[in-house]
C-alpha cells in the first residue's frame, strides 16, 4: 500500500516541498511540519505512526502543479465538506452541468496554482454549503477517479462570489461562484476504491 501511495505522490507532486508552508512560517520548528494540527499529531502518537509524520508532511503541497491541475479538470465530479461556525458539518456533491446535445460544462477552473473556482447552480434552496462558508470559510475537496482508483484531497479556504462575471461563458446557468485558496493538496492511497466506469450515453 505504501508503494501505491508513493507512486501517486510521484505522479502528481514532482516539485520539491515549498520551504514556507501555508500553515506555518517556519515548518522546521513546527512539530506538525506546517501540515498537521495537534489533534492529528496526537493520533499519530496514539496509533504508533509518529515516526512517519515528517514523511507524510512531505507529500502535502500548498499549491497545484500542472499534472494535478489536469487531473482535477478531467474529473466529472467531486465532493466538498464544509462546517458552520459551531462545527456542524455538511458534505455535498458537485458535478458538471450537462444540457444535451451540448457538451458538459467545465467542472472547475484553475486561474493559478493556488486558486480553484467552481460554479454554484440553483438547487433546493437549502444553501447548506453556501451557508456554512458564509460563517466558516474552511473547505475540504475530495476528487476520486474510480476508473483508475486515484484519489486526491484539497483543503483550503473559500469565499462566495455572487457575480459570475467573465465565467458566464463557461457556466451560463451558474448562480454564483466559489473561489478556493489552496492550503493543502495531497494524494490518498488506492485502498478500497471500487473500480467503476461511466455508463454509456
Image (cartoon, grey):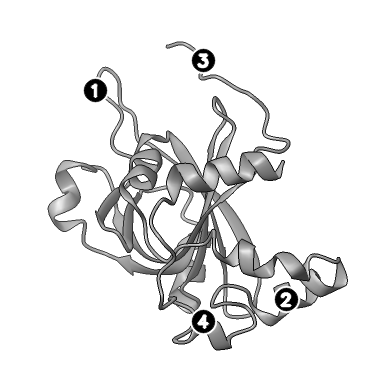
**Does residue 100 appear left or right of residue 3 in this picture?**
left
**Mark 3 vs mark 4: which is more N-terminal?**
4
Give the spatial CA distance, label 3 vs label 4. 45 Å
Q: What label does residue 199 carry, if any?
A: 3
The answer to whether the residue labelled 3 contacts the one labelled 4, judged by CB atoms less than 8 Å apart, is no
Q: Which residue is mark 1?
A: 102
**Mark 3 vs mark 1: which is more N-terminal?**
1
Q: Secondary structure at mark 1?
A: loop
Q: Which residue is mark 4?
A: 27
Give the spatial CA distance, label 4 vs label 2. 14 Å
What percent of the width, then of the height, locates residue 66? Answer: 31, 47
**Mark 2 vs mark 1: which is more N-terminal?**
2
- From the viewer's perspective, is residue 29 above or below residue 93? below
Q: Count neighbours of disc 4 (C-alpha within 10 A) and say few if under 14, some if 14 to 19, many if 20 or more.
A: some
**Mark 4 vs mark 2: which is more N-terminal?**
4
The answer to whether the residue labelled 2 contacts the one labelled 1, judged by CB atoms less than 8 Å apart, is no
Q: Count neighbours of disc 1 (C-alpha within 10 A) and say few if under 14, some if 14 to 19, many if 20 or more.
A: few
**Which residue does the image show at 30% across and 20% down from the upper left?**
100
Q: Judge by depth and name the residue closer to the eye, 41 or 197.
A: 41
Give the spatial CA distance, label 2 vs label 1. 48 Å
Q: Nearer the viewer, mark 4 or mark 2?
A: 4
Q: Quadrant of the C terminus?
A: top left
Q: Nearer the viewer, mark 2 or mark 1?
A: 2
Give the spatial CA distance, label 2 vs label 3. 42 Å
**Which residue does the image show at 49% across and 46% down from the upper left?**
10
Q: Which residue is mark 2?
A: 41
The answer to whether the residue labelled 3 contacts the one labelled 1, judged by CB atoms less than 8 Å apart, is no
**Which residue does the image show at 41% across and 50% down from the upper left?**
14
Amino acid at each position: 500500500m505504501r508503494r501505491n501511495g508513493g507512486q501517486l505522490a510521484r505522479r502528481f507532486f514532482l516539485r520539491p516541498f515549498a520551504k514556507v508552508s501555508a500553515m506555518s512560517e517556519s515548518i522546521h520548528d513546527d512539530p506538525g511540519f506546517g501540515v498537521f494540527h495537534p489533534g492529528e499529531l496526537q493520533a499519530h502518537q496514539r496509533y504508533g505512526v509518529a515516526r512517519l509524520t515528517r514523511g507524510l508532511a512531505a507529500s502535502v503541497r500548498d499549491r497545484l502543479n500542472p499534472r494535478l491541475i489536469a487531473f482535477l479538470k478531467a474529473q466529472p465530479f467531486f465532493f466538498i465538506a464544509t462546517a458552520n461556525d459551531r462545527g456542524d458539518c455538511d458534505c455535498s456533491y458537485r458535478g458538471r452541468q450537462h444540457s444535451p446535445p451540448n457538451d458538459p460544462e467545465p467542472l472547475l477552473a484553475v486561474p493559478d496554482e493556488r486558486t480553484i473556482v467552481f460554479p454554484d447552480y440553483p438547487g433546493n434552496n437549502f444553501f447548506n454549503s453556501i451557508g456554512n462558508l458564509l460563517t466558516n470559510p474552511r473547505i475540504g475537496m475530495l476528487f476520486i477517479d474510480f476508473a483508475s482508483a486515484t484519489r486526491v484531497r484539497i483543503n483550503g479556504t473559500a469565499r462566495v462570489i455572487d457575480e459570475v462575471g467573465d465565467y458566464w461563458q463557461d457556466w451560463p446557468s451558474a448562480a454564483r461562484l466559489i473561489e478556493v485558496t489552496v492550503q493543502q493538496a495531497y494524494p490518498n492511497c488506492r485502498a478500497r476504491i471500487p473500480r467503476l466506469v461511466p455508463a454509456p450515453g
